[in-house]
Image (spheres, grey):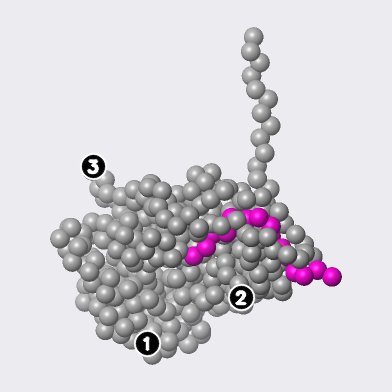
Amino acid sequence: MSDFDLVIRGGGLWLAPLGGDGYANADRSPVMDVGIRGDRLVAIAPQLPGTGRVEIDAGGKLVSPPFVESHIHLDSALTAGQPRVNESGTLFEGIQIWAERKPSLTVEDVEERAIATLKTQAQQGVLYVRSHVDVSEPNLTALRALLAVREAVQDWITLQILAFPQDGLYGDPRNAELYQEAISLGVDVLGGIPHYELTREAGVQSVEQIFNWAVQKDRLIDLHCDEIDDPQSRFLEVMAACAIRHDIGPRATASHTTAFGSYENGYANKLMGFLQRAKLNFIANPLINITLQGRTDTYPKRRGITRVKELWQGGLNVSLGHDCIQDPWYSLGTGNMLDVASMAIHCCHMTGQQEMVACYDMITYGGAQTLQLQNYGLAVGNPADLIILDAADPIAALRQRATITTVIRRGKILAETQPAVTAWHGIPIP
Ligand code: FE2
């Protein structure tokens, strides 16, 4: 009889950062064996005694906790071109096209596209996802569909659902009521879009109201905040103030904050101190930020992304999201989190060795912190969720867009992918 259900031999385990000099600690990736019994990691040792019913030889390759997709819109995924293509490439044309697509949503339509997207993500090592769902739509069709999807997929992927008032909490007299109905239907996270409310005052009011509801209903918060190039869009300071007043910083997340990239440095430096007091999480969506923002600039053209490097250097938690996969805002997108981290490395000048490692952490441990996941990571007693990559370390994985060869969920092999093989025939030399 075997000692374990599954043993992974000789993988370079990607352990949690220690904080401080943890990023420089070579021991973050010791070569170890991992023993799994049932759905749990039960043993980690250099040469684990005993046998597994199934054994996988990792051959020194990277064994990592799964990727965390901390920001995606599953309700609009796979709708690019419906009913028309976003020719300007702007956020606001995307919002308009989505408004045209929304009346034709059905529960089946949303479920089918969401599950197809989640499968694409899972086979590439994503096992934790936070999805925004538009709750400005009068029948809450997308929300009902995604709440059902959350249950349907729970054995193979963990899905958090977030109420997102795409057209503004106060953009229409019915929206606040729809939002409260969404809370009562069981969303995990409360969203918002203060920079798209009709006035600055309505934006401030929306942030304060959402924090109040989150405290009353014990929900997490994640707002689309200042997703614009306008340096006067300053709802991040309102979020920081609310987080400090309610003392719930780590439960609140500011997504996008692209205007932070356009703030004058004197203001940005003052704000950074408030953010450190508030302890908010941050999510950048580099694929989308670099393409949607800067559209009204000629040259020099802004990158339109938040201050990822400075937030990370300041000790704040940053994670990265894909945001869109083939939808009205972005007709590309693969679900590959290594693409997302690679774009962050480029757009945010994160090309130092520790900086690239930090970007890998933003799609793993950082994302887990944003989602407030419990028992995430490669430690005895945690759920047996892990991935094996065809690369020796995180930097190699990012450079090569390494294949995720094995995805393990709750102790079972969920997906396996063979790395591409090239047959090189050469060119005959005359
Ligand atoms: Fe978004």
Q: Secondary structure at mark 2?
A: loop
- Name, please, the residue furthest toward the left: 266
- Name, please, the residue furthest toward the bottom: 216
- Name, please, the residue furthest toward the right: 1
Residue lying at 45% horizontally and 71% vertically, measured from the top left: 369
- Between disc 1 and disc 2, the foreground one is 2
Q: Quadrant of the N terminus?
A: bottom right
* Residue occupied by mark 1: 215
114, above or below 249, in the image: above
- Residue 179 seen anywhere in this rendered image of the structure: yes
Secondary structure that dominates the magenta span:
strand
Q: Nearer the viewer, residue 170 or 59?
A: 59
Tag of residue 299: 3
- Label 1 amino acid? Val
Percent position (x, y) of residue 225? 32, 68
Percent position (x, y) of residue 43? 66, 69
Tag of residue 381: 2
Q: Is residue 369 left or right of residue 151?
A: left
Marks 1/2: CA–CA distance:
31 Å
Q: Which region of the structure is painted magenta? A: 1-16
Residue lying at 56% horizontally and 57% vertically, measured from the top left: 30
Residue lying at 17% horizontally and 63% vertically, measured from the top left: 267
Q: Quadrant of residue 218?
A: bottom left
Specify which label sits upstream in the sequence, 1 or 3: 1
Q: Quadrant of residue 20?
A: bottom left
Q: Is residue 38 left or right of residue 227?
A: right
- Between disc 2 and disc 3, the foreground one is 2
* Magenta stretch: includes residue 5: yes
Q: Is residue 37 left or right of residue 369?
A: right
